[in-house]
Amino acid sequence: MKPALLEYLLCPACRSELRLSATATEGSEVIEGRLDCDSCGSGFSIVDGVPRFVGELNEDRRATADAFGSQWTTFDDLQSHHEDQLKGWIAPVTPDFVRGRRVLELGCGKGRHTVSVAAWGARDVVAVDVSAAVEVAFRTTRHLANAHVVQADIFRLPFRPVFDYAFSIGVLHHLDDPAGGFRQLAAMVHRGGAISAWVYGRENNGWVVRVVGPLRKLVTSRMPSSVLYWLSLVPAAIVFAVLRTIYRPLASTRWSQRLFYSDYLTSIASFPFREIHTIVFDHLTAPTAFYLRRGEVEAWFRDVGARDVVIGWHNRNSWRGFGWLGAPLAQPKP
Protein backbone atom coordinates (compact mmCIF):
# COMPACT_ATOMS: atom_id res chain seq x y z
CA MET A 1 0.00 0.00 0.00
CA LYS A 2 1.29 3.44 -0.91
CA PRO A 3 0.67 6.01 1.87
CA ALA A 4 -0.96 8.27 -0.76
CA LEU A 5 -3.93 5.88 -0.75
CA LEU A 6 -4.98 7.36 2.61
CA GLU A 7 -6.36 10.34 0.66
CA TYR A 8 -9.18 8.06 -0.54
CA LEU A 9 -9.86 5.87 2.49
CA LEU A 10 -12.46 6.02 5.25
CA CYS A 11 -13.45 3.48 7.86
CA PRO A 12 -16.18 1.31 6.27
CA ALA A 13 -17.86 0.89 9.67
CA CYS A 14 -18.30 4.53 10.73
CA ARG A 15 -16.96 6.62 7.79
CA SER A 16 -14.20 8.22 9.91
CA GLU A 17 -10.51 8.82 9.20
CA LEU A 18 -8.07 5.91 9.30
CA ARG A 19 -4.60 5.97 10.85
CA LEU A 20 -1.77 4.13 9.11
CA SER A 21 0.83 2.13 11.06
CA ALA A 22 3.54 0.41 9.04
CA THR A 23 5.53 -2.56 10.34
CA ALA A 24 7.29 -3.49 7.07
CA THR A 25 8.01 -1.37 4.02
CA GLU A 26 9.69 -1.82 0.64
CA GLY A 27 10.50 1.45 -1.07
CA SER A 28 7.28 3.46 -1.29
CA GLU A 29 5.06 0.48 -0.38
CA VAL A 30 3.78 -0.49 3.06
CA ILE A 31 3.95 -4.28 2.86
CA GLU A 32 2.71 -5.09 6.37
CA GLY A 33 0.84 -2.88 8.80
CA ARG A 34 -2.56 -1.70 9.99
CA LEU A 35 -5.21 0.88 9.34
CA ASP A 36 -7.01 1.83 12.54
CA CYS A 37 -10.10 3.90 13.20
CA ASP A 38 -9.82 5.87 16.45
CA SER A 39 -13.54 6.74 16.31
CA CYS A 40 -15.07 3.27 16.43
CA GLY A 41 -12.07 1.11 17.22
CA SER A 42 -12.15 -0.89 13.99
CA GLY A 43 -8.86 -2.10 12.60
CA PHE A 44 -7.82 -3.48 9.25
CA SER A 45 -4.65 -5.33 8.30
CA ILE A 46 -2.27 -4.60 5.46
CA VAL A 47 -1.00 -7.96 4.24
CA ASP A 48 1.43 -8.48 1.34
CA GLY A 49 1.03 -4.83 0.35
CA VAL A 50 -2.78 -4.81 0.19
CA PRO A 51 -5.19 -3.25 2.73
CA ARG A 52 -7.76 -5.92 3.69
CA PHE A 53 -11.28 -4.66 4.41
CA VAL A 54 -13.27 -7.83 3.67
CA GLY A 55 -15.34 -9.04 6.61
CA GLU A 56 -18.01 -11.73 6.69
CA LEU A 57 -19.59 -12.46 3.31
CA ASN A 58 -22.84 -14.28 2.65
CA GLU A 59 -22.60 -17.72 1.06
CA ASP A 60 -23.12 -16.52 -2.51
CA ARG A 61 -20.56 -13.71 -2.29
CA ARG A 62 -18.01 -15.98 -0.64
CA ALA A 63 -18.45 -18.63 -3.34
CA THR A 64 -18.08 -16.00 -6.06
CA ALA A 65 -14.97 -14.52 -4.42
CA ASP A 66 -13.41 -17.96 -4.11
CA ALA A 67 -14.18 -18.83 -7.74
CA PHE A 68 -12.70 -15.66 -9.21
CA GLY A 69 -9.80 -15.63 -6.80
CA SER A 70 -8.85 -19.07 -8.12
CA GLN A 71 -9.38 -17.96 -11.70
CA TRP A 72 -7.16 -14.90 -11.61
CA THR A 73 -4.39 -16.52 -9.58
CA THR A 74 -4.30 -19.26 -12.23
CA PHE A 75 -4.74 -17.14 -15.36
CA ASP A 76 -2.49 -14.34 -14.09
CA ASP A 77 -0.75 -13.30 -17.31
CA LEU A 78 -1.40 -10.09 -19.25
CA GLN A 79 -2.11 -10.19 -22.99
CA SER A 80 -1.50 -7.53 -25.63
CA HIS A 81 -5.18 -7.34 -26.59
CA HIS A 82 -6.41 -6.52 -23.06
CA GLU A 83 -6.10 -2.77 -23.58
CA ASP A 84 -8.19 -2.83 -26.76
CA GLN A 85 -10.80 -4.95 -25.01
CA LEU A 86 -11.04 -2.36 -22.24
CA LYS A 87 -11.51 0.44 -24.76
CA GLY A 88 -14.42 -1.47 -26.27
CA TRP A 89 -16.04 -2.14 -22.92
CA ILE A 90 -15.92 1.46 -21.65
CA ALA A 91 -16.63 3.35 -24.91
CA PRO A 92 -17.31 6.25 -25.40
CA VAL A 93 -14.65 6.79 -22.72
CA THR A 94 -11.15 7.12 -24.20
CA PRO A 95 -7.63 7.17 -22.73
CA ASP A 96 -7.63 10.97 -23.01
CA PHE A 97 -10.74 11.10 -20.85
CA VAL A 98 -9.13 9.48 -17.80
CA ARG A 99 -5.92 11.52 -17.94
CA GLY A 100 -5.47 13.49 -14.70
CA ARG A 101 -8.61 12.04 -13.10
CA ARG A 102 -9.12 10.03 -9.92
CA VAL A 103 -10.42 6.65 -11.09
CA LEU A 104 -12.06 3.81 -9.17
CA GLU A 105 -12.17 0.30 -10.64
CA LEU A 106 -14.57 -2.11 -8.95
CA GLY A 107 -13.69 -5.73 -9.58
CA CYS A 108 -10.11 -5.51 -10.80
CA GLY A 109 -9.26 -9.23 -10.91
CA LYS A 110 -5.59 -9.61 -11.81
CA GLY A 111 -5.19 -5.88 -12.57
CA ARG A 112 -5.15 -6.04 -16.38
CA HIS A 113 -7.38 -2.94 -16.71
CA THR A 114 -5.64 -1.17 -13.84
CA VAL A 115 -2.38 -1.23 -15.76
CA SER A 116 -3.99 0.36 -18.83
CA VAL A 117 -5.78 3.13 -16.92
CA ALA A 118 -2.62 3.98 -14.99
CA ALA A 119 -0.65 4.12 -18.24
CA TRP A 120 -3.28 6.43 -19.77
CA GLY A 121 -2.29 9.04 -17.20
CA ALA A 122 -4.94 8.83 -14.48
CA ARG A 123 -3.98 10.91 -11.46
CA ASP A 124 -4.66 7.75 -9.43
CA VAL A 125 -6.47 4.51 -10.15
CA VAL A 126 -7.74 2.64 -7.11
CA ALA A 127 -8.47 -0.98 -7.99
CA VAL A 128 -10.75 -3.05 -5.76
CA ASP A 129 -11.56 -6.74 -5.62
CA VAL A 130 -13.15 -8.92 -2.98
CA SER A 131 -11.09 -11.98 -3.86
CA ALA A 132 -7.52 -13.20 -3.45
CA ALA A 133 -6.91 -11.89 -6.98
CA VAL A 134 -5.77 -8.66 -5.29
CA GLU A 135 -2.44 -10.33 -4.63
CA VAL A 136 -1.92 -10.81 -8.36
CA ALA A 137 -3.14 -7.26 -9.04
CA PHE A 138 -0.66 -5.88 -6.52
CA ARG A 139 2.24 -7.73 -8.14
CA THR A 140 1.07 -6.51 -11.54
CA THR A 141 0.78 -2.84 -10.57
CA ARG A 142 3.14 -2.16 -7.65
CA HIS A 143 5.70 -0.51 -9.94
CA LEU A 144 3.11 2.11 -10.99
CA ALA A 145 3.17 5.21 -8.78
CA ASN A 146 -0.47 6.06 -9.59
CA ALA A 147 -1.95 2.57 -9.00
CA HIS A 148 -3.40 1.29 -5.72
CA VAL A 149 -4.98 -2.09 -4.88
CA VAL A 150 -7.53 -2.69 -2.10
CA GLN A 151 -9.36 -5.84 -1.02
CA ALA A 152 -12.93 -4.92 -0.12
CA ASP A 153 -16.55 -5.94 -0.59
CA ILE A 154 -18.42 -3.77 -3.11
CA PHE A 155 -21.28 -3.51 -0.62
CA ARG A 156 -18.98 -2.15 2.14
CA LEU A 157 -16.48 0.09 0.43
CA PRO A 158 -13.89 2.02 2.48
CA PHE A 159 -13.72 5.13 0.29
CA ARG A 160 -14.57 8.79 0.26
CA PRO A 161 -16.96 9.77 -2.56
CA VAL A 162 -14.26 11.77 -4.34
CA PHE A 163 -13.64 9.88 -7.57
CA ASP A 164 -13.96 11.64 -10.92
CA TYR A 165 -14.71 8.42 -12.77
CA ALA A 166 -15.60 4.88 -11.71
CA PHE A 167 -16.04 1.78 -13.83
CA SER A 168 -16.84 -1.91 -13.44
CA ILE A 169 -16.20 -4.48 -16.17
CA GLY A 170 -17.75 -7.94 -16.07
CA VAL A 171 -18.45 -7.87 -12.33
CA LEU A 172 -21.93 -6.58 -11.57
CA HIS A 173 -23.68 -9.48 -13.32
CA HIS A 174 -21.93 -11.91 -10.95
CA LEU A 175 -23.32 -10.24 -7.81
CA ASP A 176 -26.40 -11.49 -5.99
CA ASP A 177 -27.68 -7.89 -6.25
CA PRO A 178 -26.37 -6.34 -9.50
CA ALA A 179 -28.45 -3.15 -9.17
CA GLY A 180 -27.24 -2.66 -5.60
CA GLY A 181 -23.65 -3.09 -6.72
CA PHE A 182 -24.14 -0.43 -9.38
CA ARG A 183 -25.52 1.97 -6.76
CA GLN A 184 -22.36 1.44 -4.71
CA LEU A 185 -20.27 2.23 -7.78
CA ALA A 186 -22.16 5.50 -8.28
CA ALA A 187 -21.98 6.39 -4.57
CA MET A 188 -18.20 6.63 -4.73
CA VAL A 189 -18.25 9.31 -7.48
CA HIS A 190 -18.66 13.01 -6.72
CA ARG A 191 -21.42 14.98 -8.42
CA GLY A 192 -20.05 15.98 -11.78
CA GLY A 193 -18.15 12.72 -12.14
CA ALA A 194 -18.89 9.85 -14.50
CA ILE A 195 -19.52 6.10 -14.35
CA SER A 196 -19.25 3.15 -16.74
CA ALA A 197 -20.39 -0.46 -16.51
CA TRP A 198 -20.23 -3.47 -18.81
CA VAL A 199 -22.47 -6.50 -18.23
CA TYR A 200 -23.76 -9.60 -20.00
CA GLY A 201 -26.83 -8.94 -22.15
CA ARG A 202 -29.97 -11.09 -22.07
CA GLU A 203 -30.76 -10.32 -25.69
CA ASN A 204 -29.12 -12.81 -28.11
CA ASN A 205 -27.93 -14.93 -25.18
CA GLY A 206 -30.96 -17.17 -24.77
CA TRP A 207 -28.92 -20.23 -25.70
CA VAL A 208 -26.34 -19.38 -23.01
CA VAL A 209 -29.06 -18.96 -20.39
CA ARG A 210 -30.78 -22.22 -21.34
CA VAL A 211 -27.75 -24.44 -21.99
CA VAL A 212 -24.57 -23.07 -20.38
CA GLY A 213 -26.35 -21.53 -17.37
CA PRO A 214 -27.74 -24.74 -15.85
CA LEU A 215 -24.50 -26.62 -16.58
CA ARG A 216 -22.48 -23.89 -14.84
CA LYS A 217 -24.81 -23.49 -11.88
CA LEU A 218 -25.45 -27.16 -11.14
CA VAL A 219 -22.16 -28.78 -12.17
CA THR A 220 -19.05 -26.82 -13.13
CA SER A 221 -19.21 -24.04 -10.52
CA ARG A 222 -19.30 -26.74 -7.84
CA MET A 223 -16.10 -28.38 -9.04
CA PRO A 224 -12.71 -27.77 -7.44
CA SER A 225 -10.89 -25.11 -9.44
CA SER A 226 -8.04 -27.48 -10.27
CA VAL A 227 -10.47 -30.02 -11.77
CA LEU A 228 -12.32 -27.40 -13.76
CA TYR A 229 -9.03 -26.10 -15.13
CA TRP A 230 -8.23 -29.41 -16.79
CA LEU A 231 -11.82 -30.17 -17.76
CA SER A 232 -12.24 -26.79 -19.45
CA LEU A 233 -9.26 -27.50 -21.70
CA VAL A 234 -11.48 -29.74 -23.83
CA PRO A 235 -14.17 -27.19 -24.78
CA ALA A 236 -11.48 -24.51 -25.00
CA ALA A 237 -9.59 -26.58 -27.57
CA ILE A 238 -12.77 -27.11 -29.60
CA VAL A 239 -13.64 -23.40 -29.53
CA PHE A 240 -10.08 -22.44 -30.45
CA ALA A 241 -10.06 -24.84 -33.42
CA VAL A 242 -13.38 -23.47 -34.71
CA LEU A 243 -12.21 -19.87 -34.32
CA ARG A 244 -8.97 -20.45 -36.20
CA THR A 245 -10.41 -22.57 -39.02
CA ILE A 246 -13.71 -20.76 -39.62
CA TYR A 247 -14.20 -17.43 -37.86
CA ARG A 248 -10.77 -15.86 -38.38
CA PRO A 249 -10.49 -16.75 -42.11
CA LEU A 250 -14.02 -15.45 -42.77
CA ALA A 251 -13.80 -12.37 -40.54
CA SER A 252 -13.39 -9.88 -43.41
CA THR A 253 -15.77 -11.57 -45.85
CA ARG A 254 -19.49 -11.24 -46.50
CA TRP A 255 -19.97 -14.70 -45.00
CA SER A 256 -18.95 -13.54 -41.55
CA GLN A 257 -22.38 -12.31 -40.47
CA ARG A 258 -23.96 -15.65 -41.39
CA LEU A 259 -21.94 -17.44 -38.75
CA PHE A 260 -23.37 -18.35 -35.35
CA TYR A 261 -22.73 -15.70 -32.66
CA SER A 262 -20.67 -13.91 -35.29
CA ASP A 263 -19.88 -10.54 -33.70
CA TYR A 264 -18.51 -11.94 -30.48
CA LEU A 265 -16.71 -15.01 -31.82
CA THR A 266 -15.12 -13.01 -34.63
CA SER A 267 -13.89 -10.47 -32.07
CA ILE A 268 -11.96 -13.17 -30.19
CA ALA A 269 -10.93 -15.27 -33.20
CA SER A 270 -7.30 -14.09 -33.11
CA PHE A 271 -6.79 -14.54 -29.37
CA PRO A 272 -4.11 -17.04 -28.27
CA PHE A 273 -5.22 -20.37 -26.84
CA ARG A 274 -4.43 -19.29 -23.29
CA GLU A 275 -6.98 -16.49 -23.54
CA ILE A 276 -9.66 -18.76 -25.04
CA HIS A 277 -9.07 -21.15 -22.15
CA THR A 278 -9.49 -18.22 -19.73
CA ILE A 279 -12.79 -17.23 -21.36
CA VAL A 280 -14.18 -20.78 -21.26
CA PHE A 281 -13.07 -21.24 -17.65
CA ASP A 282 -14.63 -17.87 -16.76
CA HIS A 283 -18.04 -18.88 -18.14
CA LEU A 284 -18.02 -22.16 -16.23
CA THR A 285 -16.71 -21.09 -12.81
CA ALA A 286 -19.09 -18.39 -11.52
CA PRO A 287 -21.80 -19.55 -9.07
CA THR A 288 -23.99 -16.57 -10.07
CA ALA A 289 -24.43 -14.92 -13.46
CA PHE A 290 -27.26 -12.61 -14.53
CA TYR A 291 -27.97 -11.78 -18.17
CA LEU A 292 -29.50 -8.31 -18.22
CA ARG A 293 -31.83 -6.61 -20.66
CA ARG A 294 -31.16 -3.13 -21.97
CA GLY A 295 -34.09 -1.74 -19.99
CA GLU A 296 -32.62 -3.02 -16.74
CA VAL A 297 -29.28 -1.34 -17.40
CA GLU A 298 -31.02 1.89 -18.38
CA ALA A 299 -32.95 1.75 -15.08
CA TRP A 300 -29.70 1.52 -13.11
CA PHE A 301 -28.44 4.79 -14.57
CA ARG A 302 -31.82 6.44 -14.18
CA ASP A 303 -32.10 5.40 -10.53
CA VAL A 304 -28.77 7.04 -9.58
CA GLY A 305 -29.72 10.27 -11.34
CA ALA A 306 -27.25 9.89 -14.21
CA ARG A 307 -27.46 12.30 -17.15
CA ASP A 308 -26.44 12.13 -20.80
CA VAL A 309 -26.50 8.36 -20.54
CA VAL A 310 -25.16 6.30 -23.44
CA ILE A 311 -26.10 2.60 -23.55
CA GLY A 312 -24.27 0.63 -26.23
CA TRP A 313 -24.79 -2.86 -27.65
CA HIS A 314 -21.35 -4.51 -27.59
CA ASN A 315 -20.62 -7.50 -29.88
CA ARG A 316 -24.37 -8.15 -29.89
CA ASN A 317 -24.13 -10.03 -26.61
CA SER A 318 -23.51 -7.43 -23.87
CA TRP A 319 -24.34 -3.91 -22.72
CA ARG A 320 -21.95 -1.07 -21.95
CA GLY A 321 -23.27 2.02 -20.24
CA PHE A 322 -21.86 5.47 -19.51
CA GLY A 323 -23.35 8.45 -17.71
CA TRP A 324 -22.65 11.61 -15.73
CA LEU A 325 -23.68 12.21 -12.13
CA GLY A 326 -24.79 15.82 -12.26
CA ALA A 327 -23.17 18.49 -14.41
CA PRO A 328 -20.48 16.98 -16.66
CA LEU A 329 -16.82 17.97 -16.38
CA ALA A 330 -16.01 17.42 -20.04
CA GLN A 331 -17.61 15.21 -22.64
CA PRO A 332 -15.68 12.11 -23.77
CA LYS A 333 -14.90 11.85 -27.45
CA PRO A 334 -17.25 9.54 -29.42
Image (cartoon, helix red, strand yellow):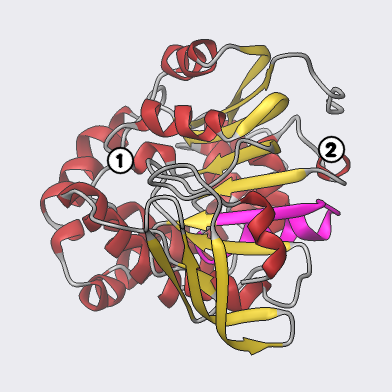
Q: Residue furthest front?
A: 39
Task: Give coordinates of residue 281: x percent, y percent.
Answer: 35, 62
Q: Residue at x 11, y 50 (%)?
A: 218
Where residue 6 sits, quadrant-wise, is bottom right
Give the mark count: 2
Quadrant showing the N terminus: bottom right
Q: Badge 2, how many Cα within 10 Å: few under 14, some, many 20+?
A: some
What residue did someone put label 1 on? Answer: 289
Q: Is residue 29 above or below residue 66?
A: below
**Amino acid type at image mark 2:** Phe
What residue did someone put label 2 on? Answer: 97
**Amino acid type at image mark 1:** Ala
Q: Residue furthest left?
A: 218
The reply to whether the magenta stretch includes residue 12 is no
Q: Residue at x 41, y 34 (%)?
A: 181
Instruction: Compare residues 256 and 305 and report the one nearer the observer.
Output: 305
